[in-house]
Amino acid sequence: MTAASESDDDYLTEIVRKSSVGIAAFTAERIILAGVAYVITATLGAASYGFFAVFTRGEVISRNLVAGIGDGYTRTIPQLSTSARRTILSVGTIGFVTVWVVVAAVAVISRDMLVDVTLLKPRHEGVVVLFAVGLLPFVLLRNLRDMFRALRRIKIAMLVSRISVPLALLAGAVFVVLAGGRSLFVVWAGVVGVAFVLLTAGVVILRRYTEVGFGSVRSHRPVVRRFLRYSADTTGVAVLELIQRRAVFAVMALYLSPVAAGAFSLSIVIGLVVRWPLSGVNSILPPIAAALYGDDQKRTLQRLYQQTSRIATVATTPVFALGYAYAPDLLAVFNEAYAQQAAVLRLVLTAQYGATIFGSVGLLLLMTDNERESLRVQVINAGIALPLLVGLTVQFGPLGLGAAYLLSLLVNNTTELLLLYAYDGFTPFSREQAAAVGLGVVLVSGIILSRSVVGVAGSGIAVALGIGSYALIGWRVLLRTTDTAAISALLA
């Protein structure tokens, strides 16, 4: 092994080691969000979770509007002095607050229309106003998370991004139970209150554990101009990606019933579990990718892309298989009315599994200075996604929305990969990935067959044997020596 390849393997070891923090935070986030869903459905009913989902998904959409500024942090902060970092944080924070003001004003002014055209009821107008005002702490928590990520303070970034918001949602859900109320307004009031407390804690952590604070927005003007140019392009990309990946929730609110919307939102909560290894990789890869590309180490970056995609695919295949096979049972845990939407959950799981196979393609496209090219291709993708979402949902209801979600995500990943390959020659695919997918199909078929023959409880033995066999094959055949060495270093 050459010194260069050893250095490359060190990067993989760092990613695997630090991604464990992101994976742990992601897992905690999924558990908390599932707990929120369970508390709401058990306390207020299946339809109420559909109403609740409109606001939680609206909060997610609002936070993603400022994702481009966070990408600007990641691309520029690592190369800057402490003084310049403070200036960039100040400028970025102004951008975050500006977005909040615009979104909140639009929501308050158009609250009557929002209630009329969505599944919300007239009694929810007060919740819309509270939602608009209460977006501020969520937006600023995203600001803190992006700065911590740019500084490679991954543990703190994961704590802020993966745990704080779900904790706020859970607190609101628990608060309504303790208060003995049945009002969505009471739930969201608890959510906003906890979010402000967590934001205060995040600011204290930033000032205490880093050298970065707020600085003058008038200094370091060349750096600020570069940051703003980059952030403007990445914001365009983020908005267009938002149309593809988050417009599904707008369509959900416009065309589905409260119960169907609750089932679809819950399917997203469960389906995203498939991304658990990729979520960890994405938490640490961007600053490393930006540094490697800046140093013209494209070969190392390509190797990391393929390694991380392979590990993620091999690791998540059994999770996908279990979720796909037991989809009706998973939904029924929350509410029997949701079990009828098992096909939608399976479509969502398939979409997320496919996205995992493609790896961190969108992030790499931005970290390799292809943000303007990405913006152009996202215009095309958005033009494809919107008609798909609306047309299939109107025609086929929740099943059509699930199918459109799968197709739009596949189109987005494919076009991004074609662009990344055309400009930098990067590709994530390997024969080990193909083998993992093939084994996944066999695993799903075997579990569904055993479940139909001996029932859910009786299929446990077959599941244990299947997962055990896959794990053995995965470690010895599907993962390469460098992959297992990096994982072993984490476990040591």
Image: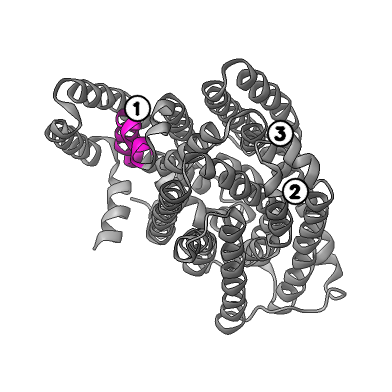
User: Is 46 drawn above or below residue 282 in the view shown?
Assistant: above
Amino acid found under the numbered disc labelled 3: Gln
* Relative height, residue 380 to residue 31 (above, below): above
Is residue 144 at all visible to an observer of this figure?
yes
Q: Name the residue under label 1.
A: 437
Are the residues flagged by discs 1 and 2 in contact, CB closer than 8 Å?
Answer: no
First-in-chain label (1 vs 2): 2
Label 1, residues with CA under 10 Å away: few <14, some 14-19, many ≥20: some
The answer to which of 44 and 16 lies nearer the viewer is 44
Give the residue at mark 3.
378
What residue type is disc 1 on?
Val
Q: Position of residue 107 (x, y in %)?
A: 78, 50
For mark 2, what is the residue?
235
Report, in whole angstroms, how far the alpha carbon at label 3 lies from the one at label 2: 12 Å
Q: Residues within 10 Å of mark 3 (few under 14, many from 20)?
A: many
**What is the x, y in percent for residue 139?**
68, 60
Q: What stretch is highlighted in magenta?
A: 313-333
Foreground pick, 217 / 126: 126
- Given residues 262 and 425, the one toward you in this image is 262
Mark 3 or mark 2: whose residue is earlier in sequence: 2
Residue at position x 51%, y 56% from top? 283
Is label 3 in contact with label 1 (beta carbons under 8 Å)? no
Disc 3 and disc 1: Cα gap in Å?
A: 28 Å
